[in-house]
Amino acid sequence: MPTDIIGTRIYRQGKEEFDTELGPVVVNFLLADEINRAPAKVQSALLEVMQERSVSIGGKTFPLPNPFLVMATQNPIEHEGVYPLPEAQRDRFLFKINVGYPSAEEEREIIYRMGVTPPQPKQILNTGDLVRLQGIAANNFVHHALVDYVVRVVFATRAPEQLGMNDVKSWIAFGASPRASLGIIAAARSLALVRGRDYVIPQDVIEVIPDVLRHRLVLTYDALADEITPEIIINRVLQTVALPQVNAVPQQGHSVPPVMQAAAAASGR
């Protein structure tokens, strides 16, 4: 039930009043393992959580802690006892990352690591560090030509025929929403920060586009019957929409903050 996730009001007979019990979503990091096993009614409970970052119980709104992140997993080969995620909910996820089988070398390393005492994770950042890094990333410079490029790419998923991709039009029932444009810019800014820059270059944008778009495209039955994947459509769009050549440089007065230096400064280390 949705109340199992967001919380509910419980009547305390001794006090003769209702108390609010917040659910497990009120955390910094929410992991929804095999999220597609939850029915639509339960999935809908996450819509406010993921967009507004708050929960509403008994006419009151409770903000979620900052930072807040939802990560979900799905097994693509499961077909029984699973439910498709609503389009509105899929649109609220920034990325969809396909995780395939490990390589032979990676699998060998997994065996070696798990054959002894499993490694224990070490804390690198605290919540304050992460919030500060988010603020730094949000201020990274994006050239207006790259913003225009992102808009053209997203628009191409809605009206591909205007760019001469008539075959692609028959594959897409619904294109990406404006959240996709916002997500591409935000992700590119974060990637630039990870790479030690306070400005975005075209390569940053290109690298994040597939992960931001693949779960936002609703394909037609014809596309599914012909085994057309979102990756095929995204590649066609990227090949068609010209990438601008911009001379992106840091803004005046901005230093280039490597991630670990920024984190260390945030915590005073």
Image (cartoon, grey):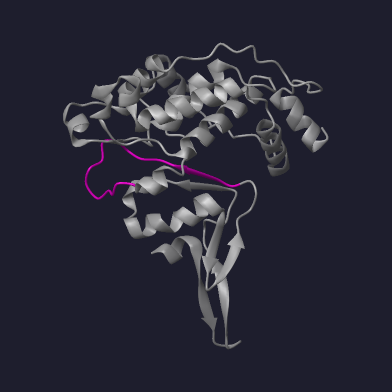
Q: Position of residue 154 (x, y in %)?
A: 43, 30
Q: Is residue 117 magenta?
A: no
Q: Position of residue 139 (x, y in %)?
A: 69, 32
The residue shown at (66%, 36%) is: 134
The residue shown at (49%, 15%) is: 243
| Residue 32 in the image: above or below residue 58 | above
The residue shown at (37%, 35%) is: 215
Q: Quadrant of the C terminus?
A: top right
| Residue 14 in the image: above or below residue 269 | below
Q: Is residue 81 magenta?
A: yes
Q: Position of residue 157 (x, y in %)?
A: 36, 30
| Residue 219 in the image: above or below residue 237 | below
Which residue ends up furthest to the front in the rendered image? 162
Q: Position of residue 9 (x, y in %)?
A: 52, 74
Does any portion of residue 124 appear in the rendered image?
no
Which residues, given as a range, are shown in magenta?
68-85
Does any portion of residue 243 appear in the rendered image?
yes
Q: Quadrant of the N terminus?
A: bottom left
